[in-house]
Image: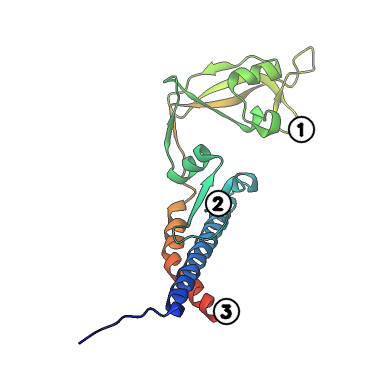
Amino acid sequence: MKLKLDIDPDIVAMMAAEIKAGERAVTSAMREAGAGLKTAWRGQITGAGLGRRLGNTIRSQTYPKSGDSLNAAALVWSQAPVIIGAHDTGPLIRSKTGFYLAIPTEAAGKGRGGARLTPGEWEQRRGLRLRFVYRRRGPSLLVAEARLNSRSQAAASRSKTGRGLATVPIFLLVPQVKLRKRLDLARDAERVAASVPGLIVAGWVEGHDR
């Protein structure tokens, strides 16, 4: 018995077309998954009250940047990883010097661009001295002899007699702070990852229908 195997050129072409369809399907799925995760993370951040500006630090990129590949991948990241990571994990924050963390009160006001002031910066900007007040119960304080302006912020008195002066708490002093966990980025990442196989199959089938 003599057997002969002939390969129809059309079969080769069909296999090549199938690979191309697969490359398009995988790349499209990863692009959609990356964009979806970026949108979900941005939504979490703004929904947690952390602001659109921080939300916009979430970026995504599909690889390869051009063309299609069966090994396509999507990368989603933040340009402010330390801040995002802190709100995602809820860490315990301690002073680097081993002393107190200074938490500004409303009376402290803000620095440029809404930045929080340190005690040293506050003294320089307000021209007032801070005084330490120890409390056995509750946080200790840094206070100043000042008046409160129309924005409830401490300011130097304009009166030569010191009229309107009060002892105003400017900073609360605590040994450590437990940052509240406000994000759950892993939840969205797992949901998007679980959707990828379905996206690939749907894209592959759609490619055959064209």
Task: Using the image, tell me which numbered label, if any, was put on residue 150.
Answer: 1
Which quarter of the figure is the C terminus placed in? Answer: bottom right
The type of residue carrying mark 1 is Ser
Which of the 4 image quarters holds residue 168? top right
Task: Using the image, tell me which numbered label, if any, was put on residue 53.
Answer: none
How far apart in space, not on screen, are marks 1 and 3 (Cα)? Answer: 67 Å
Point 47% across, 43% down: residue: 180
| Residues at discs 1 and 3 in contact (Cβ within 8 Å) | no
Q: Which of marks 1 and 2 is in front?
A: 2
How far apart in space, not on screen, are marks 2 and 3 (Cα)? Answer: 27 Å
Residue 120 shown left or right of residue 164 in the figure: left
- Whole-percent x, y for residue 83 in the image: 52, 39
Q: Name the residue under label 2.
A: 61
Residue 54 shown left or right of residue 176 in the figure: right
- Whole-percent x, y for residue 67 in the image: 56, 58
| Residues at discs 1 and 2 in contact (Cβ within 8 Å) | no
Please say if 107 is above or below 62.
above
Which of the 4 image quarters holds residue 95? top left
Q: Can residue 164 be seen in this view?
A: yes
Closer to us: 50 or 13 = 13
Q: Mark 3 points at which residue?
A: 210
Mark 1 or mark 3, earlier in chain: 1
Point 79% across, 17% down: residue: 158
Q: Is mark 3 on a helix, strand or loop?
A: loop
- Whole-percent x, y for residue 34 in the image: 52, 57
- Whole-percent x, y for residue 169 in the image: 60, 25
Residue with the most extreme bottom position? 1
Mark 1 or mark 2, earlier in chain: 2
The type of residue carrying mark 2 is Gln
Please say if 203 is above or below 176.
below
Point 44% across, 58% down: residue: 71
